[in-house]
């Protein structure tokens, strides 16, 4: 059994087959937890034992790359410095009211 420290209390499902992963206290009964780090973000993916035996790597997952216009140029937000990314997250979208 594998110990899980930061798993959410919601139900967890296998990333591939969507089978429910059973957690008892902080132990996984029928699967594995895969931790991935992409740039500054950490994320967890559960896989059931059968799917993990068939393919232990994470497939069919790719983060969407977001572009924004800066001084007339389109640039990927992922390449910005930390301060500019923070500013981008705090932006509010303005919607023009319909008449």
Image (spheres, rainbow, N blue to C red):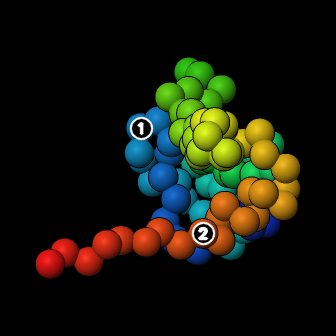
Query: Is 52 situated above or below 95?
Result: above
Q: CA distance from mark 1 to mark 2?
A: 36 Å
| Relative to 25, 39 lies left or right | right
Q: Position of residue 40 (x, y in %)?
A: 81, 50
Circle 2 residues within 10 Å: few <14, some 14–19, many ≥20: few
Query: Is 98 situated above or below 56?
Result: below
Q: Which residue is found at the position 56% from the left and 27% from the top?
A: 59
- Name the residue carrying label 2: 91
Between 44 and 19, the residue placed more toward the observer is 44
Compare marks 1 and 2 and give the one earlier in the sequence.
Answer: 1
Badge 1 marks a residue whose secondary structure is loop
- Name the residue carrying label 1: 17
Q: Which residue is found at the position 58% from the left and 74% from the top?
A: 9
Q: Position of residue 29 (x, y in %)?
A: 62, 54
Comparing labels 1 and 2, the label whose residue is closer to the camera: 2
Query: Is 61 situated above or below 21?
Result: above
Q: Which residue is found at the position 42% from the left and 47% from the top?
A: 19
Badge 2 marks a residue whose secondary structure is loop
Q: Position of residue 84 (x, y in %)?
A: 78, 57
Between 37 and 8, the residue placed more toward the observer is 37
Quarter assignment of residue 27? bottom right
Quarter assignment of residue 54? top right
Q: Is residue 94 visible?
A: yes
């Amino acid at each position: 059994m594998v110990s899980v420290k930061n798993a959410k209390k919601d139900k967890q499902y296998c990333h591939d087959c969507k089978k429910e992963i059973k957690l008892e206290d902080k132990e996984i009964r029928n699967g594995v937890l895969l931790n991935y780090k992409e740039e500054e973000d950490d994320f967890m993916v559960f896989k059931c034992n059968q799917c993990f035996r068939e393919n232990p790597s994470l497939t069919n997952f790719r983060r969407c790359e977001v572009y924004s216009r800066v001084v007339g140029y389109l640039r990927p937000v992922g390449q910005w410095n930390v301060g500019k990314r923070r500013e981008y997250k705090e932006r509010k979208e303005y919607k023009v009211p319909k008449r």
